[in-house]
Image (cartoon, rainbow, N blue to C red):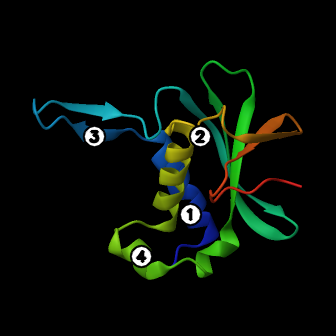
Amino acid sequence: MEESFEEVRGRVEAILTEQSESLHLATGVKTFVPAIGNEFHLDAVRIGAIDQIPTLQITFHWDGYEDQFGVQAPLDQLDRKDRESMHDVGLSWSQLLTVYLEEDLLAYGREIGGATKRTIDGVTWLTWPSSEWIAPN
């Protein structure tokens, strides 16, 4: 079943604000952990547009930086994504976007320091090579 743009927005927001249960296999200890990390502080998840292409915009703060950061992905990609491969791994488009964000923010060599940055209206928009995120105009 296809997710509408508003469903994607709502699910991404929920994933990024709710902590999930993590089980340490060796000890059996369960803890609750944030989706990205303790450094990540979500400001908003919105539907926007670039050149009339609908986008999902995620703005956030990151410990150690004063900037408000943002990333955005084209929502028109929903229809062009390979649904079979997403189904095979059991992820929806909204879940996949949060995984991409986590990988880009936490992977060595990518992180905020490895991103291309463009500040517009007080938001520093981030993009990385070979990522789903697109730069604003």
User: Between residues 70 and 106, which one lies in front from this camera angle?
Assistant: 106
Q: Residue at x 67, y 68 (%)?
A: 75
Residue 96 vs 1, above or below: the answer is: above
Tag 2 residue:
110
Residue 23 vs 53, above or below: the answer is: above
Badge number at residue 8: 1
Q: CA distance from mark 4 to mark 2?
A: 25 Å
Q: CA distance from mark 2 to mark 3?
A: 26 Å
Instruction: Look at label 4 and name its amino acid.
Output: Ser
Comes first in the chain, label 2 or label 1: 1
Q: Residues within 10 Å of mark 2 (few under 14, many from 20)?
A: some
Q: Secondary structure at mark 2?
A: loop
Tag 4 residue:
85
Residue 78: % across, % down = 60, 75
Comes first in the chain, label 3 or label 1: 1
Badge number at residue 114: none
The answer to whether the residues at label 3 and label 1 have Cβ atoms under 8 Å apart is: no
Q: Secondary structure at mark 4?
A: helix
Q: CA distance from mark 3 to mark 1?
A: 22 Å
Q: Secondary structure at mark 3?
A: strand
Query: In the picture provided, is 58 more to the left or to the right than 85?
Result: right
Q: Nearer the viewer, mark 4 or mark 2?
A: 2
Tag 3 residue:
21
Instruction: Look at label 3 and name its amino acid.
Output: Glu
